[in-house]
Amino acid sequence: MRIEEVLVPIDFSQHSLRALEFALSTTSPEGEICLLHVLEAEFLERAALEGLGEREALLATLRGRAEERLREVIAAIADPKPTLSSMVV
């Protein structure tokens, strides 16, 4: 049995990258995998309170870094592969 749609939460740890490997091994090449990275609102608030920058600027920086890293992870996956997408929330 091959799976057609999978959501993989990813924080770039070895464990989450292994979860992606497992998803790739069980998903049909015609299927879809979406990588999800979550930015923690509490961390952004604390960082802003500690004077590390404005919340929105910090959010933009962290979102940009996560999106770039997700593009790198996707680019490193060899063909044939399912359709891969990503989102940062």
Image: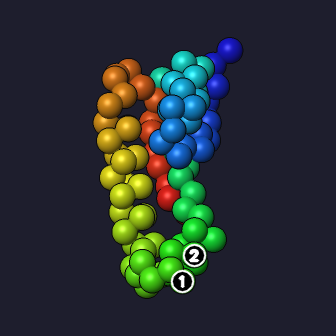
Circle 2 residues within 10 Å: few <14, some 14–19, many ≥20 = few
Residue at mark 2 to residue at mark 1: CA–CA distance:
5 Å
Q: How is the protein colored in the picture?
A: rainbow
The location of residue 17, given as percent across then percent down, is 50, 32
Query: In the figure, is residue 41 to the left or right of 62?
Result: right
Secondary structure beneath dot 2 equals helix
Circle 1 residues within 10 Å: few <14, some 14–19, many ≥20 = few
Q: Residue at x 57, y 75 (%)?
A: 46
Which quadrant of the rendered structure holds the N terminus?
Answer: top right
Furthest residue in direction right, as rendered: 1
Query: Based on the displayed image, in which of its 4 quarters is residue 40 positioned?
Result: bottom right
Which quadrant of the rendered structure holds the C terminus?
Answer: bottom right
Q: Amino acid at mark 1?
A: Leu
Query: In the figure, is residue 1 to the left or right of 83?
Result: right
Q: Amino acid at mark 2?
A: Arg
Residue 31 visible in this rendered orientation of the protein: no
Q: Residue at x 62, y 36 (%)?
A: 6
The circle on residue 46 is 2
The location of residue 59, given as percent across then percent down, is 45, 72
The circle on residue 49 is 1
81 is higher (above) or lower (below) than 67: above
Is there CB contact under 8 Å for labels 2 and 1? yes
Residue 9 visible in this rendered orientation of the protein: yes
Looking at the picture, tell me which residue is in the foreground, 35 or 43. 43
Looking at the picture, tell me which residue is in the foreground, 71 or 28. 71
Q: Residue at x 38, y 38 (%)?
A: 73
Query: Based on the displayed image, in which of its 4 quarters is residue 7 positioned?
Result: top right
Secondary structure beneath dot 1 equals helix
The location of residue 32, given as percent across then percent down, is 53, 36
Q: Residue at x 61, y 35 (%)?
A: 5
57 is higher (above) or lower (below) than 62: below
